[in-house]
Amino acid sequence: MEGLHVAVVERERAALDVAAALDFVSDPHFGGIATFIGRVRDHNVGRRVTGISYDLFVPLALNQFRAIGERALAEVGAPLKLWIVHAKGQLAIGDPAVVVAAGTPHRDEAFRACRLAIEAVKHEAPIWKQEHYVDGDSAWSEGCSLCEEDRAHTHAAHGHAH
């Protein structure tokens, strides 16, 4: 797919570049740009998090990201520019872990492409997350295996119903 940029960034070497993402998906014909930036938060499933390590099988992850781009193009149609970049390695609280950006002529397609891409990355890509906790413990999870449990906990903690 032309207009697709996928990458895995070794966090020790560089940070994720949101400005580069916006620049890549920009086009004089595009009126809509949607971005999603996933950052490391200081808690998960009721535990205080001090940082995260991400491990990815890079060749498979890049192939998956490209397939996600093709799916987004098939769903929202051309023209579309899409950026999918995930971090690998040690991240601190507040660091961006993933940046997805979509540029299209109109906002609806930009939102749809961005949402499709980030959901697919979270649920399908070969990404393993190790959370490091305040008490010195750590735990691994694959992709979004804790997403539903975390969402349920977050909603319960803040008094939100499903």
Image (cartoon, rainbow, N blue to C red):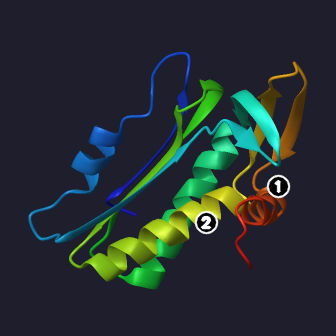
Where residue 56 sits, quadrant-wise, is: top right
State whether residue 12 is above or below residue 142.
Answer: above
Which residue is at the front of the view, 126 or 138?
138
Mark nearest the camera among 2 and 1 is 1
Task: Say which residue appears at 65% left-offset and 47% top-offset.
Answer: 61
Hey, what amino acid is under mark 2? Answer: Glu
Residue 52 at what x, y percent from top left? 70, 30
For mark 2, does the 10 Å Cα neighbourhood hold few (<14), some (14 to 19), or many (20 or more) residues? few
Residue at the disc numbered 1: 146
State whether residue 124 is above or below residue 18.
Answer: below
From mark 2 to mark 1, how far is it between C-alphas? 14 Å
For mark 1, does the 10 Å Cα neighbourhood hold few (<14), some (14 to 19), or many (20 or more) residues? few
Label 2 or label 1, whichever comes before in sequence order? 2
State whether residue 143 is above or below residue 139.
Answer: below
Q: Can see residue 35?
A: yes
Hey, what amino acid is under mark 1? Answer: Leu
Task: Say which residue appears at 56% left-offset and 55% top-offset.
Answer: 65
